[in-house]
Image (cartoon, rainbow, N blue to C red):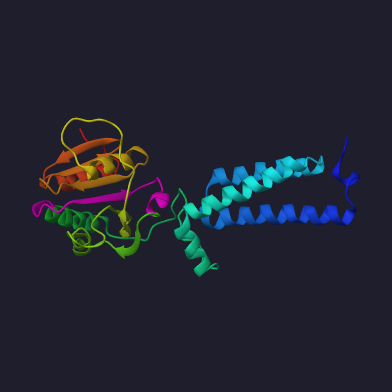
C-alpha cells in the first residue's frame, strides 16, 4: 500500500497535516459563528475525513478536490449570509443573539394586557383598511426567517405596530414578528404557500399561510382592500370579525382549537 509517509519527509507530512487542520478548522469556525447550519457541520466533517484519507493514501487529485470543494462551499454559504458576515466582521467578539429552538424562560409580563394591546392595534388597522401581517412566535424558532428582516427589539405597543404598517413607511411591507411581549423584527418576508385555495387572497395571506405551514406560530393578517381580519394557523386560514378577535386570538395563543 502506497502511504503518504512512504513518499514525504516527516517535516513535509506534518506541515501538510497542519494545513488540512487549519483549513477545516477555519471552515468549521465560520459555520459556527455565521452560517449556523447543522448540514454544514456534517458536510465539513465528512469532507475532512475524505480529505485526510485521500492524503494518507497519497490520492493527490482527490485530496485537492475535497479541499477545493469545502472552501468553495463555505465561501458560497458566507456570501448567502452576507448580512451576518458583516455583523461578525464589525464585532467578532459579540455574543450571538440567535435563539435556539427551545426558548429560555421569558420575562414576566402581563399577558392579558398584551392581548388587549394587540386587539387595539388590529382593530384600528382593520377600521382604516391598513394592510398588516403579524406573526406570534411560539415553540418553533423563527430565527432563520427573521434574518431577512429589520431588527426592532422593542416592547409591543399598539402605536408602534400601527406606525410600522402605515402606508409609505419603510417597514410597512412584510411581516412583524413578535416573541412574548417584544417586537423582534419588522419587514420580514415569508415564502408564500403553494397550496391552492378558494377565494381572492393577496400576497399577505399567502405569506401568512406559508409561515404557518412550517411552524406553530399564530399569524394575524389584515386585508388592505376590505379590512378583513384573518388568522393563519397550521396551514389554515380563518376569518374573524372585530368583536370576536380577542377571544379567537387568546384561544390560538393558548393552544385551544377553534370550533
Q: Is residue 244 left or right of residue 179?
A: left
Give the residue at x 27% y 55%.
111
Look at the image and tell me in which quarter the C terminus lies: top left
**160 or 201, which lies in front?**
201
Where residue 216 appears, as percent x and y from the top left, is 35, 41
Give the residue at x 28% y 43%.
207
The residues colored magenta run: 126-146
Q: Is residue 51 left or right of residue 168?
A: right
Q: Is residue 87 magenta?
A: no
Give the residue at x 48% y 64%.
86
Q: Is residue 127 magenta?
A: yes
Q: Is residue 9 left or right of residue 252?
A: right
**115 or 169, which lies in front?**
169
Quarter-wise, where is residue 240 in the image? top left
Say if 106 sits above or below 43 in the image.
below
Give the residue at x 39% y 50%.
145
Say if 73 sits above or below 149 in the image.
above
Say if 163 sits above or below 9 in the image.
below
Quarter-wise, where is residue 45 in the image? top right
Quarter-wise, where is residue 166 in the image? bottom left
Check the image and name the residue furthest to the front: 61
Where residue 91 appears, as percent x and y from the top left, is 51, 69
Amino acid at each position: 500500500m502506497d502511504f503518504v509517509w512512504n513518499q514525504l519527509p516527516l517535516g513535509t507530512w506534518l506541515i501538510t497535516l497542519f494545513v488540512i487542520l487549519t483549513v477545516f478548522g477555519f471552515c468549521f469556525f465560520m459555520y459556527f459563528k455565521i452560517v449556523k447550519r447543522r448540514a454544514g457541520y456534517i458536510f465539513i466533517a465528512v469532507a475532512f475525513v475524505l480529505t485526510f484519507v485521500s492524503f494518507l493514501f497519497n490520492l493527490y487529485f482527490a485530496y485537492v478536490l475535497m479541499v477545493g470543494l469545502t472552501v468553495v462551499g463555505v465561501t458560497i454559504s458566507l456570501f448567502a449570509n452576507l448580512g451576518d458576515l458583516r455583523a461578525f466582521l464589525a464585532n467578532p467578539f459579540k455574543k450571538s443573539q440567535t435563539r435556539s429552538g427551545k426558548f429560555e424562560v421569558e420575562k414576566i409580563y402581563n399577558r392579558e394586557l398584551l392581548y388587549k394591546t394587540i386587539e387595539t392595534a388590529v382593530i384600528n388597522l382593520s377600521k382604516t383598511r391598513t394592510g398588516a401581517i403579524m406573526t406570534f412566535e411560539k415553540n418553533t424558532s423563527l430565527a432563520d426567517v427573521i434574518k431577512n428582516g429589520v431588527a426592532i427589539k422593542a416592547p409591543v405597543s399598539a402605536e408602534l405596530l400601527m406606525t410600522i404598517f402605515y402606508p409609505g413607511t419603510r417597514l410597512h411591507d412584510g411581516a412583524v414578528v413578535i416573541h412574548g411581549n417584544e417586537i423582534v423584527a419588522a419587514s420580514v418576508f415569508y415564502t408564500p404557500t403553494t397550496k391552492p385555495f378558494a377565494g381572492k387572497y393577496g400576497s399577505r395571506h399567502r405569506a401568512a399561510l406559508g409561515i404557518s405551514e412550517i411552524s406553530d406560530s399564530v399569524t394575524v393578517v389584515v386585508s388592505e382592500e376590505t379590512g378583513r381580519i384573518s388568522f393563519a394557523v397550521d396551514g389554515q386560514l380563518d376569518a374573524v370579525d372585530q368583536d370576536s378577535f380577542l377571544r379567537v386570538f387568546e384561544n390560538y395563543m393558548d393552544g385551544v382549537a377553534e370550533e
